Image (spheres, rainbow, N blue to C red):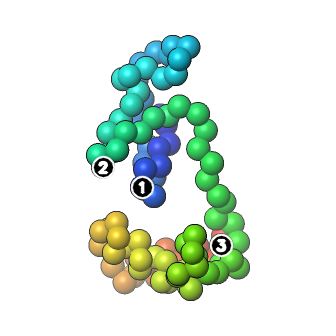
Amino acid sequence: MALVIVGGVVGAYAMQGGTRAAGPPASSYLSVNGMMASADGPIKTFPLRGIKDTPPYMHDGRLLTLDDTVEFFNLILGTRLTAEEKQDLVAFLRAL
């Protein structure tokens, strides 16, 4: 099982195949949203602990609140979260 991050989307994918000296086998590459992804090497992710204390959000500071951030990704990723699900997600992030 490998954790793959492509275009800001995190997914767990089962990887099959052996290893070779030059890198992962061709069978371990995945096409995710039209992009090639591999489980070759570690992926650095930032911790979410204390995220409520570090606004603004995004690399350029365009989102001022966690509510804005959840709504932004709801629209961009098309997750179709309900108002209650968005409130629950924001409450969870604030509890970290």
Kind of residue at badge 2: Asn
Badge 2 or badge 1: first in the primary sequence: 1
Work out whether 25 lies above or below 96.
Answer: above
Kindly identify the residue that appears in the image at 45 percent across and 58 percent down.
8
Going by the numbered disc 3, the residue's amino acid type is Ile
Contact, CB < 8 Å: mark 2 with mark 1?
yes
Which residue does the image show at 34% across and 66% down from the upper left? Answer: 77
Give above or below for 23 relative to 69: above
Up/down of 91 relative to 30, above or below: below
**Which label is found at residue 33?**
2
Residue 81 versus residue 42: which sits nearer the camera? Answer: 42
Counting from the top left corner in percent of width and height, residue 38 is at: 45, 35
Which residue bears the numbered disc 3? 51
Q: From the viewer's perspective, tell me whether residue 91 is left or right of residue 46.
A: left
**3D distance between C-alphas at marks 1 and 3:** 21 Å
- Nearest to N terminus: mark 3 or mark 2: 2
Locate residue 50 relative to residue 41 in the image: left or right.
right
Which dot marks residue 7? 1
Mark in the foreground, 1 or 3: 1
Image quadrant of residue 76? bottom left
Residue 3 position within the rendered picture, expressed as x and y whole percent measured from the top left: 50, 42
8, 67: nearer the viewer: 8
Q: Nearer the viewer, residue 45 or 34?
A: 34
Is residue 96 shown left or right of residue 22? right
Q: Secondary structure at mark 2?
A: loop
The crowding category of the residue bearing disc 1, from other C-alpha atoms within 10 Å (few below 14, some 14 to 19, many at least 20), is few
Q: Amino acid at mark 1?
A: Gly
1 or 3: tag closer to the N-terminus:
1
Front residue of 93/8: it is 8
Tell me whether circle 1 and circle 3 mark residues in contact (CB < 8 Å).
no
Q: Residue at x 30, y 68 (%)?
A: 78
